[in-house]
Image (tube, helix red, strand yellow):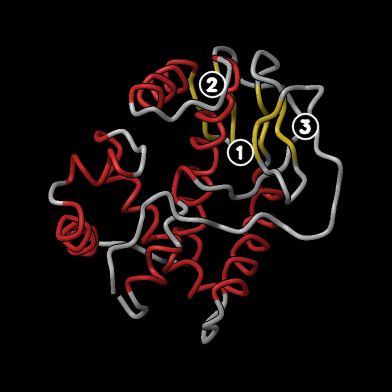
Amino acid sequence: MPRTTATTSAALASALAALVAVTACGPVHTGAAATVGHTRISVAQVQAATKANQAAGGTSGTPADDERAALSTLIRDDLLVDAAATKNVSVSEGDVQDFLAKLRGANGTDEQTAANNNIPFSSLHEVAYQGLLVDKLEQAVAPGQTDATALQTALTNYLVALSKQRGVKVSPRYGAWDPDPTKFEVVADDAFSTPFKGSVALQSPIASPAS
């Protein structure tokens, strides 16, 4: 990787970090929890992701909160995939294994890495993959930039624009997608954010090994 381990780990936003999307017009497909453009996210996917997060101790509060958190992650995952395709960015299996090996050196085992970071063990590979993907996407949308905050902001802005092109729609049973850059997540209908200046920084769900 072209950046230091600490910087790379700071970019591990992946499925569990806050990215961006906006609500599109039109109905959600029948049986879908949400749609991102023409991509359908099923209720079964949300339920499976919620159970995995709860099993790892990643609860957001009420069962409804946990479902909204899981759905938010699935939506952000889809936006990341689309951004990577648009920018011709990819992460190899070798990249993932190299990073997991560094974490293994600090934590002992992959299972312990997952436990130390409240990540379902079954999701560890995907979290590492998408975190590294975020790292490369930041470089793609802000080439030459080295400031972590500026890189995060550049990627957030890019994803805001991308999500407007694709559109995001959430089934009313889960609430609604909050388009405010300080939230960009599924919220209860009565919990839309009060706008304020700034945006949420991308943060890693995985603790970095010592450099």
Query: Mark 2: few, some, or many residues within 10 Å (few <14, many ≥20)?
Result: many
Mark 3 or 2: in front is 2
Label 1: element kind: loop
- Which residue carries the number 1 mark? 37
- Which residue carries the number 3 mark? 25
The one nearer the camera, 146 or 45, is 146
- Which residue carries the number 2 mark? 67
Q: CA gap, disc 2 to disc 1?
A: 21 Å
Q: Say whether disc 3 or disc 2 marks the residue closer to the N-terminus.
A: 3
Residue at screen point 68% across, 41% down: 167
When the figure is inspected, residue 170 is found, relative to residue 36, above or below; the finding is above
Residue at screen point 65% across, 31% down: 186
Residue at screen point 72% across, 27% down: 176
Kindly identify which numbered label has been placed on residue 206: none
Q: Say whether disc 1 or disc 3 marks the residue closer to the N-terminus.
A: 3
Q: Amino acid at mark 1?
A: Gly
Please report contact status of discs 1 and 3: CB closer than 8 Å, yes or no.
no
Q: CA gap, disc 3 to disc 2?
A: 23 Å
Relative to residue 8, is residue 165 drawn left or right?
Answer: right
Q: CA gap, disc 1 to disc 3?
A: 10 Å
Q: Say whether disc 2 or disc 1 marks the residue closer to the N-terminus.
A: 1
Residue 107 pos. (x, y %): 19, 52
The one nearer the camera, 156 or 165, is 156
Label 3: element kind: loop
